[in-house]
Each structure stands twice: as C-alpha cells, then as structure tokens.
Image (cartoon, grey):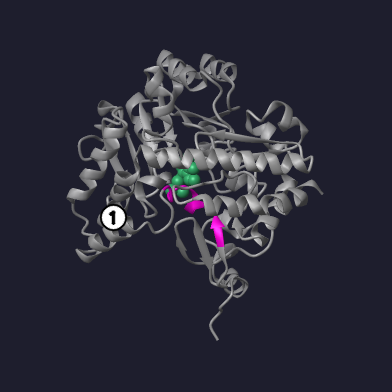
Amino acid sequence: MSPTTSAEVFAHAQSVIPGGVNSPVRAFGAVGGTPLFVASASGAHVTDVDGRTYVDLVGSWGPALLGHARPEVVAAVQEAASRGLGFGAPTTTEVELVDEIRYRVPAAESVRLVSTGTEATMTALRLARAFTGRDLVVKFAGCYHGHVDALLAQAGSGVATLALPDSAGVSTATAAETIVVPYNDVDALETVFVAHGDRIAAVVTEAAPANMGVVPPLPGFNAALRRITLEHGALLVQDEVLTGFRVGYSGWWGLEGLREGWAPDLFTFGKVIGGGLPVAAVGGRRDVMAQLAPSGPVYQAGTLSGNPVATAAGLATLRLADAGVYATVDAASARLRGAVTTALAAEGVPHAVQWAGNLFSIMFGAEAATNGAQDYATVLSTESFRYAPFFHALLEAGVYAPPSPYEAWFVSAAHDDEALGAIEAALPQAARAASQ
Ligand code: PLP
C-alpha cells in the first residue's frame, strides 16, 4: 500500500532522504511532531496529504506574495510550459523579467539571473573579490545568505534551529576569510575596518534581517554600512532575496536607500522574482556586473538560469504586484501583529512582535518585551521554548505558522478577512499554550 498520511510519508522519507526533507527547517526539528506533506495550496491555504486544510503563514518561505496558485500566474506558467520547458538558449521572457526588476530598482543597472538565492550571494562574493582584488568578507551574526561556504558562520534560522554554531564541512581556510560582526553594531564594524580595511572585499548584509526572527536595522545602520564601505573601497552587498519585492514595490531599498539617496553596489534577489519557481538574481553597478563572463573574467553559469517557465512565473507575479498588493499585505500584517500582541497580553506572556515592512516574528520573554532584540545574541537569549506549544496550538486549530521561532511569518495578498479571522480565532488558545 502506498503511504497516505503525512506520518506515513515522513516515515518512509526518513529512510531515503537525510532527515526526511530536502531543506532542514521543513523537518519540524524546532517544534517537534510530523511535518505536513503538502498536497496542494490555493490562495491563503495549504492542504496536506491527510486532507486537512490550514491557513498558511509560511508562504513558501517568501515567494507566495500573491497567495498560492494565483490563476494568472498559473496560466502564464502553463502557457510557457506549452512552448517548451527549457532551451539552454536566451529567451525574451528573461529579458522582460530583468527589465521589470530594473524598473523597480534602477540601481540594479545590470542583472544576471540564477536559480537560487545561494547562487546569487555566492556570485556577488566572487564579483566583489574580483573587482576589489581583496579576499576578506564581512557578514553579520544571524544573517542568512544561503548555504554559501563563506557565509555559513552564525547564519541564523536554519543552523540556529539545529542548534549548530556553524556548518561542518566548511574549510578552515574559507572560514578564516569571513569576519562576523554583531548586527546593528556600527562601532564593531568600524573596528574591523580599522584593523583589516584594505583587505575587505565586501560587507554582505540582509537588507532587513528576517532569518534570526525579524530584527530590523536601527535607523541609519544600513546608511552607515554604505558610508564605511565607501571610505575603505569595499563593496556593499545588500541581500534582498527575502525582502526584495515583498516588503514593497522596490523592496527594502525602496523603503530606505531610495528615500535616503544611496544604493549598495550589488543586490541579490530571489523568492518573489520566481513567483514560486526557482529564479534568483544578482544585480547592481554596471562596472561591477561587467566582470561576469562572458563580458568579463569572473566565471558564472547555470543550465537552468533564466529558465523560460520559471521566469514566466516571476514576470507574471511582479506584473501583478502593484501598490494595491503591497497595501493589502501591509494591512494584513499589521492586523495580525496586533492580534498576536492582544492574545499574548491577555495571557500575560511577555513578548515583542518585531517587524520590518510586512515581515514579522515573535520574541518571547521579559527582556525582549522591554528592550526588543537588536542582534543575534539577544535573539538566542529569548524564551524561544514558548514557540513550540504556541505553534502546535495554532496547527491544531488549522493555522500553519513557520515551524521555527527564528523564521518570519509570511502573509500574502490572499489573506482576506476570512483567513485573518481564522488566525485571530486560533490565537487565544495558542497564547494560553505559550504561557505554560
Ligand atoms: N538570502 C536570504 C536573505 C534568504 O532568506 C535566503 C533563503 O531563505 C537566501 C539568501 C538563500 O536563498 P535560496 O534558499 O534560494 O538559496
């Protein structure tokens, strides 16, 4: 008999796939229990193979800005698929997608499409090293940039969920070229640049970190990164794989750099620009991007890069993501943040709901409630043990929140009054569970 429940499929999967999953957080390691094996998703809902339907707050970990299986996006994918699944040759759609990205973020003067955010940040590092002729890279503790060897030190959610400080298998030589600095700490960064400034190729940062829970940049922090890197001839790489075209029409840069009149040298994008299929990008200054092969000496390539079906999904998604979509998602996020706080306060659970744009997460404990968490060390000292009972009470009531305290909650334009109402109805019980 073939397996029919999530528990049955998971039991078999664990014997044939490491940990039973193809990306660690899916295994429910931080919250315990059996992961949902999803059969289908539509709008704000996912349905598992057991036949239970949940209001979804995972959103495919970011891409599902419009909600799942939006008919226009599915139609674009079907139309593209009907013309062939991939050619390994250039297509018009990928150029149109790049034009759409550039229109929204003009500082991305030139853009290379890849398939994953990991590839995008890996390429950004290689470009920065080639362009500057330097080897060292600075990252911030708690920021995640994909599973790039050089960027896996203190990399937030995935490794934090597994309680790993770093990943095994990263060579000592590679790790030695990465300097890790506490997030939101300009003085620490200045100190690093005083000591090593002429050897630093790039500072890589999440535009607004959402992989150690949501820890927004303090006012002026990103601008300080821009100033310090310029002073020392290093490049600034702003990772917008998660925030890009999710927190606003022009991503986090549209909320901050655009208004303040500055831009990083390189951006990385992913998630929303693929609309649920594998598309990511690195883009930025034309002179830096011109280093990429075939116009320059930095090698980078991909059999599936700019895939016609994937880029059709991304293009259709971005074309639908207008100001109205962002207003809807922002309003849904604000309503949920308020509901979470109301429910937890009613049970006397000290907490902070931290947010950046429409991304948010919950930090439990009196310290977080009083001062918030502005860096990874503080995040790790919060009462994260309260999250598992909170999560399971929500799940029991039909709400699928992210299965880790260190991940952001993702709402979509499909989270209508009914979906939000269902979450609000589930929250009091979850807050009670978190109070124990
Ligand atoms: N950068 C950030 C900020 C991310 O959140 C992620 C994934 O969550 C990545 C990079 C890696 O992207 P991918 O999982 O597509 O490799």
Taking the spot 23% from the left edge, 60% from the top edge, the residue there is 80
Residue 336 is inside the magenta segment: no
Residue 359 vertical position relative to residue 223 in the rendered view, above or below: below
Asked if residue 204 can be seen in this view, the reply is yes
Q: Identify the secondary structure beneath mark 1.
A: loop
Q: Nearer the viewer, residue 1 or 259?
A: 259
**Which quadrant holds residue 214?**
top right
Q: Position of residue 180 (x, y in %)?
A: 57, 30
Residue 59 is inside the magenta segment: yes
Q: Nearer the viewer, residue 318 or 186?
A: 318
Q: Position of residue 251 (x, y in %)?
A: 40, 34
Asked if residue 156 can be seen in this view, the reply is no
**Which quadrant holds residue 352?**
top right
Q: Position of residue 341 (x, y in %)?
A: 67, 39
Q: Nearer the viewer, residue 46 or 194?
A: 46
Q: Is mark 1 within 8 Å of ligand 1?
A: no
Q: Position of residue 199 (x, y in %)?
A: 45, 22
According to the picture, the residue beneath numbered tag 1 turns out to be: 303
Taking the spot 25% from the left edge, 55% from the top edge, the residue there is 308
The reply, left or right, for residue 316 in relation to residue 68 is: left
Taking the spot 18% from the left edge, 54% from the top edge, the residue there is 89
The single residue placed furthest to the right in the displayed view is 436
Q: Quadrant of the N terminus?
A: bottom right
* Numbered range of the magenta stretch: 54-65
The single residue placed furthest to the bottom in the displayed view is 1
Residue 135 vertical position relative to residue 311 in the rendered view, above or below: above
The reply, left or right, for residue 212 in relation to residue 125 is: right
Taking the spot 76% from the left edge, 36% from the top edge, the residue there is 350
Q: Please give the count of numbered marks on the rendered protein.
A: 1
Please tell me how crowded label 1 is: few (under 14), some (14-19), or many (20+) other residues with Cα within 10 Å.
Answer: few
Tell me the kind of residue under disc 1: Thr
